[in-house]
Amino acid sequence: MQPIVFNKAGKFLLKQYVNGVPTMEKSLSRMGIVQQITPNISINGTPIEDGNSLWDATNLDTGIEATIAVQLGYMPTELYAFIMGDESKVLATADFPVIDEEIIVPETSTYVVTLKHTPNADGVQVVDIHNTAFKAGTTTPAKGEYILAEDKLTFHEDDAGKALFVTYYYSASNVTNFGLPKNPVRPAYQLVITGEAQGEDETLYEVATTVDKCKVLGNINPPQQGGTPTPVTITFTVLKPRGTNKAVDYMAVLIEAPTEEEEEEAEEPTEPEP
């Protein structure tokens, strides 16, 4: 085969090991933006000195270290949960926090503000710009007090026009939930990478790399919050393969140019169905 250049970063699939076998039933392939995939293989050796020569007598291979670093444009939540041994699931309901919802007390009666959500039974915390807390009133709020009724806050006329900040929990529906378990059990994976390569004569190939068994080690940062998303790198450490399998297996197949008949068929307009 002629020398080839990988002209695309490629895509990758993770198949989780279940009972010693990688399975598609526990797999993930939607990884967001793949920017670069970088394999690295290092052979470790131990020299055997020769007492009668300045040269070592031999150098024994004592180990192989192989990693594949995948650089993503950002960390997808599903991938983070997958490699941390957690599952992303949808909860029917959950208490969801709202922190510092900014409101302005109306300058005209009735001095009522409607919150974005209805707080749960724990109520709300209301503070002003100086972090001075407002107290819960009883029937009619005095200055520095509020009355909460469902999703509405009522204030005193002396607090009209003030900027306030409200913190509370509310009951949210269809909540996506994932995280870092207390005692994570992180399985091994089979890593499958597909991409495209180009030969010296401009011939195109589809390429595939299969890592029989690997595990994510090193920094595993959760999805970034705020700011411009920065690339994240996930490092897969290659483990001992099963049986006689190759630790890393490469394949390439020629992308054949379409025949004249196929090109003509593609150009023919399709008649609309009656």
Image (spheres, helix red, strand yellow):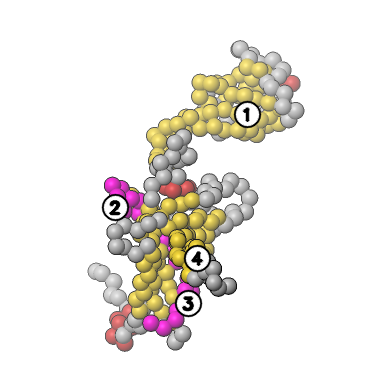
Report which quarter residue 133 is drawn in: top right
Label 2 SS = strand
Report which quarter residue 247 is drawn in: bottom left
Is residue 187 visible from the viewing direction of this image?
Answer: yes
Q: Which residue is mark 3?
A: 5
Density class for disc 4 (Cα within 10 Å; few <14, some 14-19, many ≥20) is few
Label 1 SS = strand
In reply to whether residue 68 is colored magenta, the answer given is: no
Residue 166, numbered label = 1
In reply to whether residue 12 is colored magenta, the answer given is: yes
| Residue at x 63%, y 50% (from the top left corner) | 227
* Residue range highlighted in magenta: 1-25
Give the quarter of the figure containing the C terminus.
Answer: bottom left
Q: Amino acid at mark 2?
A: Val
Is residue 14 visible from the viewing direction of this image?
Answer: no
Q: Amino acid at mark 3?
A: Val
| Mark found first going from the N terminus, 3 or 2 | 3
- Labels 3 and 1 touching (C-beta < 8 A): no
Q: Is residue 169 left or right of residue 93?
A: right
- Labels 3 and 2 touching (C-beta < 8 A): no
Residue 20 vertical placement versus 58 (above, below): above
Label 4 SS = strand
| Mark found first going from the N terminus, 3 or 4 | 3
Residue 226's x, y, as percent? 61, 47
